[in-house]
Image (cartoon, rainbow, N blue to C red):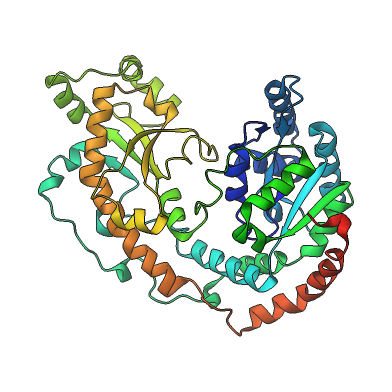
């Protein structure tokens, strides 16, 4: 199990571990749900379901291992960190899933503080989500409203009408400030896990940046797996640009007017569409909680190699690579081609001809507005939201006062070869 000890790219670990054919690994968010349910709600069914999933996927194969990335360690454990309920849960997890090794990435405390400060500021201005209406952006697109959009100029709104032009740590709520300080309780976290697990291996987060292959090979040596797929090791998976793609998924609604137009042109309904149109008005409204006259489909933009691997927000299937010259700015910053994915639960509801029409609509209407907002918001976060250096303020002084002894203690632990990766 890999711990997110404090801004250490848990998605990066999750995706790269999941790529290894001899590792089964649940979604980070699925595991977070298990932890939160068990510790805070005393509800054990999610853990029991995870144990059942493990047994079904291992099926007696001794060559496979279970991997877990504990994403929301700080938010889902109770405080004080050494509480009996935390320890009891970890012991049950250890015994039921047979987890024997914990990987404990350690980041410089100043880097942890700065990264968490910027994360909380991002939370305060919308978690990287494009403001609704900025340059015509919307989370939900109704196709008939935009049938003539190729004739409409792209509006360039002033960002100041949607988001604050100045923001700093004084804008943070006390709960966010407290969380930043809690993130620095690094030795307390180590002490909890070492009290439950026999092997807790610490490594410097910087090593993951300079030589990721070596880190994963060492992890494999301790945990009994082989690094056989390194395709995403050097891909940026946690940067600012990636977050704009992640947090700005969208849905297309095929309304009755659009459906009539497609029917007249000979485009047939997918099987799911035929089923939905036969469902009663009230039945569909209650079961699906949407307008029964609309059919919807969820889309997202992502790095092609990530789409078939990541399941944190549901399973998506790639349906297109964004063609040139679209997304040039996005592709340059990400350093990769960009794909369009469709939620697998929605894909089967549409015929290929219908999907082709929706993809054309996205190229013509959604992509230009996404890229326009991407450029604006990328600059906004770098220039207005994020601190480049730690501010000399009371918040950092309190962080260091409360956490310095924690880092002093962990330095002593790192001198012990038994705990070094």
Classify residue 280 by image quadrant.
top left
Q: Residue at x 32, y 62 (%)?
A: 375
Q: Residue at the spot x=30%, y=52% of the render?
A: 370
Residue at 22 percent of width and 39 percent of height: 361
At x 85% / y 48%, what residue is drawn?
199
- Residue furthest to the left in view is 151
Question: Is 416 situated left or right of 186 in this image?
Answer: right
Which corner quadrant holds the C terminus? bottom right
Q: What is the x, y in percent for residue 289?
A: 42, 31
Is 168 on the left or on the right of 374, as rendered? right
Residue 123 position in % (x across, y down): 51, 61
- In the foreground, 40 or 105: 105
Please indicate, yes or no, whether residue 81 appears anywhere in the rendered image: no
**View extreme (bottom): residue:** 392
Rendering quarter of residue 417? bottom right
- Foreground pick, 106 / 171: 106
Tell me the quarter of the image containing the N terminus.
top right
Number of callouts in the render? Answer: 0
Give percent across and percent down for residue 114: 59, 71
The answer to whether residue 179 is left or right of residue 277 is right
Q: In this view, does 321 lie above or below 245?
A: above
Classify 114 as above or below 103: below
In terms of image quadrants, where is residue 162?
Answer: bottom left
Looking at the image, residue 221 lies above or below residue 104: above
Residue 417 vs 219, above or below: the answer is: below
Residue 319 locus on image (x, y percent): 35, 32
Q: Nearest the camera: 81 or 27? A: 27
Residue 369: tell me if it is visible: yes
């Amino acid at each position: 199990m890999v711990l997110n000890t404090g801004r250490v790219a848990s998605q990066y670990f999750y995706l790269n571990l999941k790529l290894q054919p001899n590792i089964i690994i649940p979604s980070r968010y699925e595991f977070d749900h298990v932890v939160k349910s068990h510790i805070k709600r005393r509800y054990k069914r999610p853990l029991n379901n995870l144990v059942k999933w493990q047994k079904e996927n291992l099926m007696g194969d001794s060559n496979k291992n279970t991997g877990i990335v504990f994403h929301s360690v700080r938010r889902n454990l109770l405080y004080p960190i050494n509480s009996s309920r935390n320890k009891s849960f970890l012991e049950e997890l250890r015994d039921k899933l047979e987890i024997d090794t914990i990987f404990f990435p350690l980041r410089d405390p100043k880097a942890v503080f700065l990264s968490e400060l910027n994360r909380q500021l991002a939370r305060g201005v919308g978690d990287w989500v494009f403001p609704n209406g900025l340059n015509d952006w919307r989370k939900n697109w109704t196709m008939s409203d935009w049938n003539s959009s190729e004739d409409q100029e792209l509006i360039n709104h002033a960002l100041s009408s949607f988001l604050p032009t100045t923001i700093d740590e004084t804008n943070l709520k006390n709960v966010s400030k407290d969380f930043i300080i809690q993130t620095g309780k690094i030795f307390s976290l180590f002490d909890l896990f070492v009290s439950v697990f026999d092997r807790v291996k610490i490594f410097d987060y910087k090593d993951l940046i300079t030589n990721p292959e070596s880190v994963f090979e060492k992890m494999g040596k301790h945990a009994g797996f082989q690094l056989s797929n390194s395709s995403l090791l050097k891909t940026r998976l946690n940067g600012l640009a990636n977050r704009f793609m992640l947090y700005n998924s969208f849905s297309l609604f095929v309304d009755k007017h659009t459906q009539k137009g497609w029917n007249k042109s000979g485009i047939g309904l997918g099987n799911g569409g035929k089923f939905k149109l036969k469902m009663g008005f009230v039945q569909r409204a209650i079961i699906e909680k949407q307008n029964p006259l609309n059919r919807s489909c969820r889309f997202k933009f992502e790095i092609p190699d990530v789409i078939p691997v990541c399941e944190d927000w549901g399973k998506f299937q790639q349906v297109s690579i964004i063609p040139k010259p679209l997304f040039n700015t996005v592709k340059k910053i990400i350093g990769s081609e960009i794909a369009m994915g469709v939620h697998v639960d929605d894909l089967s509801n549409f015929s290929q001809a219908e999907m082709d029409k929706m993809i054309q609509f996205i190229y013509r209407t959604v992509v230009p507005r996404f890229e326009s907002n991407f450029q604006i918001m990328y600059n906004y976060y770098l220039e207005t939201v994020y601190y480049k250096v730690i501010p000399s303020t009371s918040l950092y002084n309190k962080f260091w006062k409360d956490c310095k002894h924690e880092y002093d203690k962990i330095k002593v632990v790192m001198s012990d070869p038994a705990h070094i990766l």
